[in-house]
Amino acid sequence: MGKLSSRTQYALEIAPTDLIHVVVGGLSYKVAIKDAVSSGIYVALAGGGQGGATQLAATKCLIGTCATLGDSVLTIDADVKGWQEIRNEGAATAYIYPQSGQNYKGLATDAYIPLPPGNKIIIESWGTGELYL
């Protein structure tokens, strides 16, 4: 148990489940771990393409290696609510693909988004089968 201020106490329990139990000011909350922010560093698939592209599993993703134009990664599932921030720190433009059979709002099914070096993009899914930029 720790103190945030003289009037507020908090406790944090993490169990091997999909939920985090948080108590703030005597009130109990259960927060889905999938809603927590995670981060990861990824290597884009050399040669590119949607099939076999590197799956981005974290909320905040850094493409650390993208050696040639079109090396590729896969973003979040458009059928599940969530978001991803993707930053490309590689040497070349990465192609950000949706999951197979999905699309970005206004684009064709399976179309990619190019992400030049030094840039970032935030992709949202509202669980509707489409991704939003």
Image: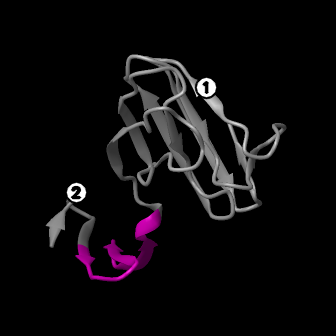
Examine the rendered structure and indicate whether residue 97 appears above or below residue 9.
above
Q: Residue at x 27, y 82 (%)?
A: 15
Query: 7 left or right of 62?
Result: left
Which quadrant, please, contains the N terminus? Answer: bottom left
Q: Residue at x 45, y 21 (%)?
A: 68
Q: Residue at x 57, y 31 (%)?
A: 95
How was the colour assigned to the protein in this rendering?
one colour
78 and 22: which is toward the camera: 78
What residue is shown with label 2? 5
Q: Position of residue 28 (x, y in %)?
A: 39, 80
Amino acid at the residue labelled 2: Ser
Farthest residue to the front: give it. Answer: 47
Amino acid at the residue labelled 1: Pro
Q: Position of residue 76 (x, y in %)?
A: 57, 53
Query: 49 left or right of 60?
Result: right
Q: Residue at x 58, y 56 (%)?
A: 82
Which element is circle 2 on? Answer: loop
> For the residues marked 2 and 1, what is the alpha-carbon distance in whole angstroms?
46 Å
Magenta span: helix, strand or loop, mainly? strand
What residue is shown with label 1? 114
First in sequence: mark 2 vs mark 1: 2
Numbered disc in front, either 2 or 1 = 1
Which element is circle 1 on? Answer: strand
Q: Position of residue 71 (x, y in %)?
A: 49, 31
Q: Position of residue 74 (x, y in %)?
A: 54, 47
2 and 12: which is toward the camera: 12
Which quadrant, please, contains the C terminus? Answer: top right
Can you tell which quarter of the image residue 6 is in?
bottom left
- Is residue 90 on the magenta stretch? no
